[in-house]
Image (tube, helix red, strand yellow):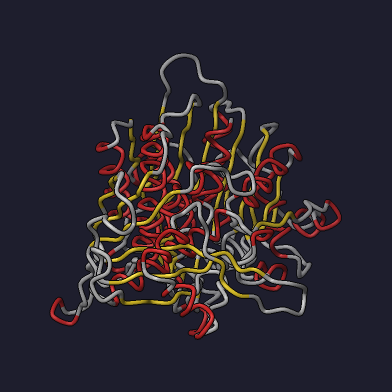
Amino acid sequence: MKFTFSRDSLETVKADLIVVLCQQKVKDKDDKGIAILQKADGGIALDKHLGGLLSKIIIDETFRGETATSKLIYTSGKTTAKAVLLVGLGKTKEFTPEVLRKVGARITSVANEVKARSVAGIIQNESVKGFAPSTRIEALVEGFILGGYKFEQYKDKKDIEPATFKDAIFCQQGGRPARLLEEAINKGTTIANAIKFVRDMVNTPSKDMTPQILSAKAKEIATEAHLSCEVWDLKKIKEEKMGLFLAVARGSENEPKFVHISYKPKGKPRSKIALVGKGVTFDTGGYDLKPGRHMLAMKCDMAGAATCIALMKIIAELKPSVEVDAYMPMTDNMIDAKAEVPGNIVTARNGKTVEIISTDAEGRLILADALSVAAEKKPDYIIDMATLTGGVLYALGEIYTAVLGNDQKLVDKYIKAAKEESEPAWQLPLASEYKKGLTEGIADLKNLGKTRADTIVGGLFLQEFVGETKWMHLDIAESAWTEEERDYTPRGGTGTIVRTLTRLITSM
């Protein structure tokens, strides 16, 4: 998508579609409200030019201006554009950048529906509820791009309806420096494209997203971004004594891979961060076979690794003053004569022995060895992300990401960033009361506890492999995938936590 600036008014700007944003004005809590045109984004001036057409339609057709609702109005040649699109911003007191992501997605949807190639609108110079123009334009750009996302790689080309919306024109009224807005556009584009990358990776069927293919993609992205990348093969993984990782990979005909991507800033880094992402390209559950209805979406089980790759791409473009290393164990969890069975005891890379209680609790096994590698490098922080437990659905539902960690300041920073980025997160406790179930067996650890608080137990298990490093675990087992379309996210992979981790990492 192309973004340009113009000094033209809405009446004269050369575009197929003009956008006017409307606040929803309500008298009291029982009032459903009505859309209000604003002076700041040209709505009042355009309405005057059109002889009151916009305000008349707002009243006659009861357009309330609720968030991301819209009304298309043809102007019969009274503007250079074919039509005006009124889009609701909702109530002023409820305004956040997330509103603009939804608005951007709505604009993209309508533009493609009416075959508009170009869309123009005014960017208000003043801050809105404390959000500067650059913050707002970044969110709007994300909405434009993500609102047009479709996963159609496996459809017949002749059945695909091509998107027409290609050009977004921002009309500037006043002397605000374009450089700040251009930086915001670039950042919004970078983040939105990274989210699309995660969605594409997660939505791709497992036969086309094996450990070999995923690791090759990671290498390709790293090379393009001028990042160092090392890929360990089976021989190297064995040399590194990654026993838990190998135990999961043993049942597959696909060779496991371990990927390490590294970013170093110019000058001395302010902090050193290790990212660890689970890369199970398909999870059958092993001999603890999943029910068919739970297995269908298990191509999503590599969302943690895909998120790590996307984040490294963002970091390479934004160039924060932090050192970041990403570690990604990649395998699938299959069944054959060599596969581990429940009751076997395996030695982890850090020397701990683990009794395999469930072969379907495989994610914590491959992450454990990866965390051990990361901890050896002495980072200031380790952040792991994984579609780890089905139990998180019952704890927090489909939208929230579960957050656990041994450093409350790090957890608090993440939750604050998640709120600011509208990617819901909630902290669960690393409750020591549940640890006994992991340690009372015939090995140092079991990979499954007795309690039903499986998300907490998963965190407690992983904590055994980070040493004294400040660490945070993100369980995205539910938030990484959606069965229902939500706002600017269609069914499938969501790309969740990319925005939040970008904000967190760049703030460090």
Give the x, y percent position of residue 111. Answer: 31, 70
> Where is the N terminus found, in terms of image quarters?
bottom left
- Count of numbered circles in the view: 0
Q: Looking at the picture, does residue 248 appear above or below residue 462?
A: below
Please indicate whether residue 164 sits to the left or right of residue 364 in the image: left
Give the x, y percent position of residue 240. Answer: 45, 37
Q: Looking at the picture, does residue 153 appear above or below residue 323?
A: below
Q: Looking at the picture, does residue 143 appear above or below residue 412?
A: below
Quarter where residue 400 is shown: bottom right
The residue depicted at 54 percent of the width and 68 percent of the height is: 341
Foreground residue, 273 or 10?
Answer: 10
> Where is the C terminus found, in terms of image quarters?
top right
Quarter where residue 252 is shown: bottom left
The residue depicted at 48 percent of the width and 48 percent of the height is: 124
Foreground residue, 172 or 308?
Answer: 172
Q: Can residue 370 be seen by looking at this rendering?
A: no
The residue depicted at 41 percent of the width and 55 percent of the height is: 195
Q: Can residue 305 be seen by looking at this rendering?
A: yes
The residue depicted at 57 percent of the width and 60 percent of the height is: 476
Give the x, y percent position of residue 490. Answer: 42, 73
Foreground residue, 141 or 19?
Answer: 19
Please indicate whether residue 156 sits to the left or right of residue 235 in the image: left
Q: Residue lying furthest left in this view?
A: 158
Give the x, y percent position of residue 171. Answer: 35, 48
Q: Residue lying furthest right in this view?
A: 433
Quarter where residue 210 is shown: bottom left
Please indicate whether residue 161 sits to the left or right of residue 53 in the image: left
